Amino acid sequence: MSSWKAHQPCPYEECGSTDAFSYNLESCAGRCHSCERKYPRSKDKKFDWAEDEYPTLSDKDSWDTMEQQKVELKPVPQEILTSVYRTVRGINSETMRFYGVKTKVNSQGEEVAQDYIYPSGGVKTRYFPKQFSAKNLKSDELFGMNLWNAGSGRIVTVCEGELDAMSAYQMCRRPKYNSAFVSLPSATPSSKLWANVSEWLGSFDKIVLSIEHDEQGNAVAQRIANLFPNKVYRVQHDKYKDANEFLEAGQTEAFFHAWFNAKKYTPENVLNTTDQFMKLYRDSGDHVSIPTGIQDFDDLAVGLMQGHFTLFKAQTGIGKTEFMRYLEHHILKNHPDIKIAIWHMEETKLRSLLGLVSYDLNKNVTRKDLIDDADLGKEVEESIARLSVDERLFQFFLNDEDDPLDLLGPHTLPVSGMWCELCIL
């Protein structure tokens, strides 16, 4: 019976890896292959759930928890007789032999486990269907990178798992295309890995990623793209999760086509390829331009543009707030089809509203005492009703307990166009 629970969440808060921690049920200790911390020896801060999930020998109830966890693990039969190169999950024996991956079978000929040997001799063992243990495994190596010398070909393909690397190699191996096929030691690689393999990866002209299109896969793609700008390409998997699913489904040619036509990867905030620029041209709608009534400004900036940030800078006390107030009133008065959101961060909610009313009435009604002294209460209420007609005006603010940095959190909702066309801060 395996005494290891592998590919578990790391208990240390600073790390946050979701699958790089291995925990031994017998010694009640473990190690994260991403942050390299040992458990429970490291004094770094742990998550609140850590001791419940990974009891230590000092925990009073740890043995009961351990026994329960042992029952959940797939037992490894003691009658394993041999390790052989054989076809498993569509990967043929020739490919297995090339990567040095042997399959352990029991006396009934059933596949029980596979050993994946890494460049330094460390072994990751997979107990079918998907449980792992590790022995002397280093987290700073790529599986299979010892099979290709640095720069031995134009292309290196990086997969997320060992089975995927072997599957991609088998499906894409062509005399014309000399590509290396390797895999990551975990879905959340450590900084140590990138430092150790950067020179080897960088020796290839093109880095192709065949990894899942999920949050972890996107993070890996972004990291590699940062290290190797303009060299990273990504395979579109479409309905198949990974390379091995393509192989098992008999879709070798489909994978080869996707691999051969891998698209250059660029971060979401960068446009670089012809396809991206064409999409921008064809799919982008026209922005609405709102004239301000100030002719020189409108000639220069085409007014206030929906979806754009327009920044006005001036010295303290020169009238930036009043200028914003003028814009608010101008839009409400002259553009009845436009909804706006406002926030004067240095003012109270009432002061901001009464400042707008003052423009509407062309009278100073910025304080209630001024309103009472001039007996303008009715006119002020009529102005408020007029300014807020058809729910065109939104005034948003932070509560006393809120962090001012939350300006870029839920308060950006009006800017998104769900509520209004323009936001004036």
Image (cartoon, rainbow, N blue to C red):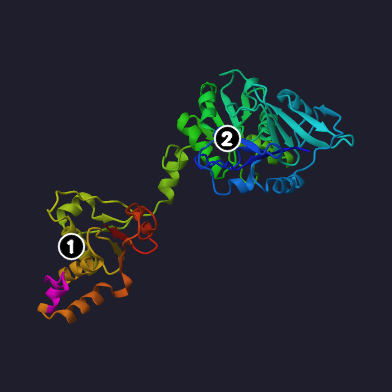
Measured as percent of width and height from the top left, residue 158 is found at 59, 31
* Apparent side of residue 271 relative to residue 110 in the rendered image (left or right): left
Which residue appears at 35% of the width and 59% of the height? 401
Vertical placement of residue 338 versus 165, above or below:
below
Vertical placement of residue 177 versus 242, above or below:
above
Which residue appears at 41% of the width and 40% of the height? 270
Measured as percent of width and height from the top left, residue 193 is found at 55, 28
Of 257 and 82, nearer the camera is: 82
* Apparent side of residue 107 relative to residue 386 in the rendered image (left or right): right
Q: Which quarter of the figure is the N terminus placed in?
A: top right
Question: Which amino acid, by three-letter code, is at mark 2?
Answer: Arg
Q: Is residue 216 visible?
A: yes
Quadrant of the rendered image containing residue 118: top right
The local secondary structure at tag 1 comes to helix
Count the marks: 2
Which is nearer the N-term, disc 2 or disc 1? 2
Q: Which residue is mark 2?
A: 41
Within 10 Å of the Cα at label 1, are there few (<14), some (14-19), or many (20+) other Cα atoms? some
Q: Which residue is mark 1?
A: 326
Q: Mark 2 to mark 1: distance in Å?
A: 63 Å
Of 276 and 215, nearer the camera is: 215
Seen as rendered, the residue at the extreme right is 108
Highlighted range, magenta: 361-372
Name the mark nearer the viewer: 2 or 1. Answer: 2
Question: Which amino acid, by three-letter code, is at mark 1?
Answer: Tyr
Measured as percent of width and height from the top left, residue 391 is found at 32, 72
